[in-house]
Image (spheres, rainbow, N blue to C red):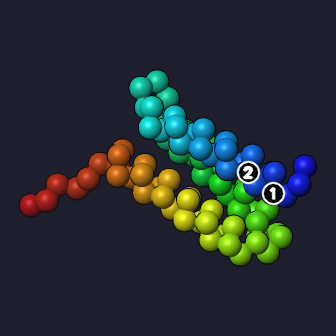
Amino acid sequence: MSDTAEIARFEALAEEALSAIYDARDADVRAALEDARYNIERALDIARMRGLVAVIERLTRRRDRIQAMYDARFKKRSAKP
């Protein structure tokens, strides 16, 4: 499998896990977040090994958006005094 195809596969797996976070009725959302982050990190590993700077930047932004979405939706916000 080519690096591009492997990156796309890991990214698709991350998107699938992200869907489970959005559809949090039956899913363990923390596990879904971990799956999404794991798969994005694998794609990032490949991009780093190949020196694909634009792909690294895109996937890093995607990883950060996934975490931010989870944080905004599921992390308890501290009460303001």
Question: Residue 62 occupies which quadrant of the picture?
Answer: bottom right
**Label 1 near label 2: C-beta < 8 Å?**
yes
Give the amino acid at mark 2.
Ala
Q: Please say if 2 is above or below 19.
A: below
* Residue 41 % position (x, y): 67, 57
In the image, taking residue 79 as reference, residue 10 lies left or right, namely right
The number of numbered discs placed on residues in the rendered structure image is 2
User: In the image as oriented, which residue stretches furthest toward the top?
Assistant: 26
Quarter of the picture holding the C terminus: bottom left
Q: Is residue 9 visible?
A: yes
Q: Which residue is mark 1?
A: 4
Work out how far the residue at label 2 is from the one at label 1, CA to CA, in angstroms.
6 Å
Question: Residue 47 occupies which quadrant of the picture?
Answer: bottom right
In the image, taking residue 28 as reference, residue 59 lies left or right, namely right
Q: Residue at x 68, y 72 (%)?
A: 54
**Front residue of 19 and 36:** 19
